[in-house]
Image (cartoon, grey):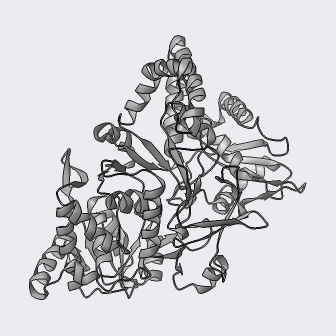
Amino acid sequence: MAYTTIPGMFLETTKTNAERPAYFEKVGGEWKEYKYGEVQDIVKKFAAGLASLGLKKDDKVAIQAHNCPRWAFSDYAIASIGAASVTVYPTLISHQIKYIIDDSDTQYVITQDQPQTDKILEFIQDSPKLKGIIAMDNTHDPAKNIISYDHIIELGEKYIKDTGFTLEKASKDIKPNDLLTLIYTSGTTGNPKGVMLSHDNLISNVKAGAKHIDFGTEDTFLSFLPLSHVFERMTGHYTAFSLGSKTYYAESIDTIGENMLEVGPTIVISVPRVFEKINAKVVDKVSNDPAIRQKIFWWAIGVGKEAAKLLTHGKQPSGMLGFKFKIADKLVFSKLKARVGGNLRFFVSGGAPLSKEVGEFFASANIPILEGYGLTETSPVITANQESLYKFGTVGCLVDKVQVKIADDGEILCKGPNVMLGYYKNPEATKEVIDKDGWLYTGDIGKFDEDNYLMITDRKKSILVTAGGKNIAPAPLEMALTSSKFIEQALAIGDRRRFVSAVIVPSFEILEEWAKGKGIEYSDRKTLLDHHSVHELFDTEVAKTMEKFSQYEKIKKYALLPNELTIESGESTPKLSVKRKVVEKNYAKDIEKIYA
């Protein structure tokens, strides 16, 4: 691991593992394999093709696609010629994409399919620095400045013959501190900012992550979190590749369960919402089982919770507890493990806080979830739990070469080789978050426990101050609400208000099944939510989730929303964080009714 740049890592890994399988994607119902040696050959030709277009060091090329091998090929090719990739979430709409393309000075956009290409065509004439589109689906239309992916490969083959282009020559002048990528943080307000990450930023985090958590050559990853996001980019993309692991690309977010059964991954990188959904579906299914099965299930969970006190510390239960745990595993937990492919070593969770209850549920079944913490600005990992000790309610201990200190007001400050170069073309914003000594102000509030494991208590700017002067952290309330199988999303309201309330999006799949069992008739979601039995259900669920909170913190009233808070509606960020100000504005009438 002597490499110091992404192209250096790529060349070392592909040479060492030339005959090993690297990537798999579903084509015509079958998994197509790419070996590491094949990947190097494709990247070489594609990089040469990009160079033939005149692209050079520090030029910007955007990738706007869902996870697939061509995303990976494009990323390594861009990096190999010293250019910088600009990652664009394919879920964004046209005007949001235009802002990123224009602000980043992007010259070419690599798109996945016609719908993604169409978004660019809406504004390409109004973006003077944008020269063209490279279409992964091989659409070729020079009149519209669309070049097919395969044509770039052909241009690359000719360029290699004419110039003697090699990846080694192309990347020899790239330095660790050179710009590797621009990742635009969506934020919860205002325009996104382009986070400048260097080769050293990502390489330092790859090496620290591999040292902190036991990833290995024999591991199999299932990739479905957006590669546009730094969490999947660093862990499931760069780290997995650097170790010579296998990566399967899920067909879509909707086929994760099916693909897990086919692939049998050993490691899955995910966000808490996926675990919450699995947990809710399992609990909902059990609640409809015969009484004897329910009794066995909850007995097993009880045994698992006792065993988890040892398992989370890297120890195995023995004696009577070990005997009961083996029975629980055979009757219940083996079936849960089979549902996630049967080979899973652990999940890695990031991007948002993981509910302690959900973490403990999986730990009871001996399915570890190793939660970590970081920001796009920190490449991203600052801390992470480990197999030898994983503690729910914490985000783990510091990874190698990263420093953290807690400011007087509780804010978490970070320093290390993982901290970004700054915000692109925005020195003022950079100065606001990085001080003269190199400390990055995360905006999160936290503290260390007795094992030096970090606990995040809230976002600094999210604290609700009620009319009575009480300071309340909304995140614990929201996590408690979404621990109910009937609640998909929740936002606590209460700043300068008399009491704390919430807007709640139900888990409609589970709610509709419940309503069917109760014989409730309804014509649409709004009619369902207006039904008195549904209100009684949510009164009970909200009260139950608030039991652990002080009286002044508890959600007193709530409004049920008929629609999910989505990226498309502008109410959620691509990493599924709810945009507080947007939701409060869009549902102002519903909120005012609560306080009327």
Q: Is residue 321 left or right of residue 493?
A: left
Residue 323 visible to the viewer = yes
Closest to the observer: 471 or 205?
A: 205
Q: Is residue 549 left or right of residue 187?
A: right
Q: Residue at x 34, y 63 (%)?
A: 65
- Position of the N terminus, as image quadrant, is bottom left
Query: Residue 511: x percent and y percent?
Result: 56, 32
Q: Residue at x 32, y 86 (%)?
A: 173
Q: Residue at x 66, y 36 (%)?
A: 530
Query: Residue 252: x percent and y percent?
Result: 35, 49
Asked if 86 appears above or below 126 in the picture, the reply is: above
Q: Residue furthest right?
A: 468
Q: Is residue 312 left or right of residue 12?
A: right
Closest to the observer: 146 or 229?
A: 229
Q: Residue furthest front?
A: 319
Asked if 218 appears above or below 167 in the picture, the reply is: above
Q: Residue furthest top?
A: 292
Q: How many marks?
A: 0
Query: Residue 152: x percent and y percent?
Result: 19, 76
Query: Residue 176: x percent and y percent?
Result: 41, 79
Residue 297 visible to the viewer = no
Image quadrant of residue 66? Answer: bottom left
